[in-house]
């Protein structure tokens, strides 16, 4: 009850510093977009480093300047789209909702013999992510042991 009163009285809202009226446009601030890949931090290649090692590099920065070398996500997606697609023709009917081995049967893709499936993710030993061609863009997990 007390916490509800505190919340309604705005006692837990953080106090933010005032926004500066003038902002220096030459700060060189860049925004890292989700999906961007970081190649270097302050000139140090990080592709073989752990997250902890990268954190140590960032903690050693004393002048407040961090330089990142990034590969933008749009370049990564363009290069990954050049990967050849894998298509399969179903050799039997499959009803994913009735498969007791399926980890999430409510989103399973069902298909009939002769349907064309495009494999999207094949990195699991037991399940593939696929979509049925010609029936929308929904992706589902499929049992690859069938």
Image (cartoon, rainbow, N blue to C red):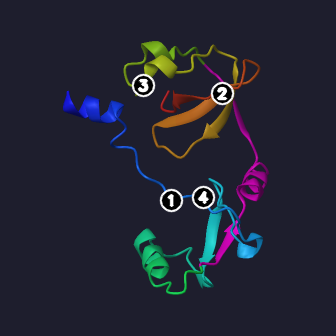
Q: Disc 3, disc 2: CB below 8 Å?
A: no
Q: Nearer the viewer, residue 29 or 115?
A: 29
Seen in the picture, residue 11 relative to 88 is either above or below; the reply is below
Q: Is residue 42 left or right of residue 116?
A: left
Q: CA distance from mark 4 to mark 2?
A: 48 Å
Q: Earlier in the sequence, mark 4 or mark 3?
A: 4
Q: In 3D space, how far apart are the residues under numbered discs 1 and 3 (Cα atoms)?
A: 51 Å
Looking at the image, tell me whether mark 1 or mark 3 is earlier in sequence order: 1
Q: Quick one: SS at disc 1?
A: loop
Range of magenta residues? 66-91
Reading the image, the residue beneath label 4 is 19
Contact, mark 4 vs mark 3 (Cβ under 8 Å): no
Alpha-carbon distance for marks 1 and 4?
Answer: 6 Å
Q: Nearer the viewer, mark 1 or mark 2?
A: 1
Q: CA distance from mark 1 to mark 2?
A: 49 Å
> Residue shown at 79%/53% (left/top)?
78
CA gap between label 4 and label 3 equals 52 Å
Q: Earlier in the sequence, mark 3 or mark 2?
A: 3
Asked whether the residues under the numbered discs 1 and 4 touch, taking CB atoms below 8 Å apart as contact, a structural biologist would say yes
Label 1 close to label 2 by CB (< 8 Å): no
Q: Magenta segment: does it hold 80? A: yes
Q: Nearer the viewer, mark 4 or mark 3?
A: 4
For marks 4 and 2, the one nearer the N-term is: 4
Q: Which residue is mark 1?
A: 17
Residue on which the image places disc 3: 102
């Amino acid at each position: 009850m007390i916490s509800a009163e505190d919340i309604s009285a705005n006692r837990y809202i953080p106090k933010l510093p005032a926004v500066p009226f003038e902002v220096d446009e030459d700060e060189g601030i860049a925004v890292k977009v989700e999906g961007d890949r970081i190649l270097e931090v302050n000139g140090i290649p990080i592709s073989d480093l752990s997250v902890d090692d990268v954190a140590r590099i960032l903690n050693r920065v004393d002048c407040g300047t961090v330089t990142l070398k990034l590969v933008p996500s749009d370049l990564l997606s363009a290069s990954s789209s050049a990967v050849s697609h894998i298509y399969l023709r179903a050799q039997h009917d499959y009803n994913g909702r009735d498969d007791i081995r399926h980890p999430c049967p409510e989103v399973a893709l069902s298909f009939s013999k002769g349907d064309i499936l495009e494999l999207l993710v094949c990195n699991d030993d037991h399940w593939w992510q696929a979509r049925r061609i010609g029936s929308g863009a929904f992706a589902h997990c499929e049992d690859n042991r069938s």
